[in-house]
Image (spheres, grey):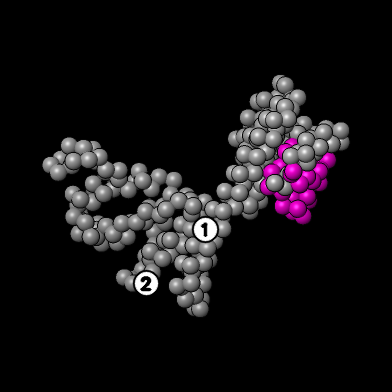
Amino acid sequence: MSRVLVVDDESGQRNIIASILKSAGHVIYEAASVDDALQQMAENRPEVVLTDLKMPGKSGLALVEETVRLPLPPEVVVITAFGTVETAVRAIRSGAYDYLNKPLEREELLLVIERAAEKYSLRVDGFQLRMELTRQVKSGLVAESAAMRSVLDIVSKVAVSDSTILIRGESGTGKERIARLIHYQSLRGHKPMQSINCAAFPETLLESEMFGYEKGSFTGAQNRRIGLFESASGSTLFLNEVGESAREHG
């Protein structure tokens, strides 16, 4: 079962929720405030946080906003009373997994907690996979020089952005390896990276590879083909030798 942190300033409400979740086999931690909850997260690493929205001092919404900034945050489910659904929607937009309305229904509560825990487990698996892929890519890199250590430092910084990145270097210096390292360290790392050697295609074929084509759009187009821009959506597209291609076709 899952580790669940129940956050509510009312001890009676916490006890009821804790009792329901314990009966389903979950390991329960309790907190009466946002600050207490953050400390519990640091100590016990819950997979799911179930928090009331309205609490004295910092609200459940503040807890959501602080939780999502953690390196591998738990999934947060917020509890809202009638008339505060708008605030719950704000919590979802801030990064909460879901919300539940009071009064809580036992089966609905257990189902949402189970699904939230499954999502957390998938994120952990994806994170571990990215770390392993990063380790494998790094294993082929020699970073003893100050210049290479600087390159790896830049890789870590740019991996968290969605910016277009230009990697320059002589042939054989490992530009694609660096591109894969950036990809695996990014939030897109759980998806396959798409790569194409632009210099290996004539201009007409390169366009088809990039943008795809529909069946019958030209002689020989017997089936619809998805282009790399579409297939790499939400992931990373590495345009190898794009400078050489521009010189040849320019």
The residues colored magenta run 25-51
Q: Secondary structure at mark 1?
A: helix
222 to 204, vertically: above or below: above
Q: Is residue 201 left or right of residue 172?
A: left
> Could you tell me which residue is drawn at 43 percent across and 64 percent down?
178
> Could you tell me which residue is drawn at 62 percent across and 46 percent down?
120
Discs 2/1, front: 1
Residue 71 pos. (x, y %): 63, 53
Residue under pointer 1: 130
Q: Is residue 9 visible?
A: no
Q: Is residue 227 left or right of residue 111?
A: left
Residue under pointer 2: 173
Q: What amino acid is labelled 2 in the image?
A: Thr
Q: CA distance from mark 2 to mark 1?
A: 23 Å
- Residue 40 falls within the magenta-colored stretch: yes
Q: Secondary structure at mark 2?
A: loop
> Could you tell me which residue is drawn at 74 percent across and 44 percent down?
26
- Residue 242 falls within the magenta-colored stretch: no
238 to 101, vertically: above or below: below
Label drawn at residue 154: none
Q: Earlier in the sequence, mark 2 or mark 1?
A: 1
Q: Is residue 135 left or right of residue 238?
A: right
Q: Residue furthest right?
A: 11
Q: What amino acid is labelled 1 in the image?
A: Arg
Q: Is residue 51 left or right of residue 193?
A: right
Quarter occupied by residue 24: top right
Residue 140 pos. (x, y %): 45, 72
Relative depth, front residue between 65 and 177: 177
Residue 18 pos. (x, y %): 80, 38
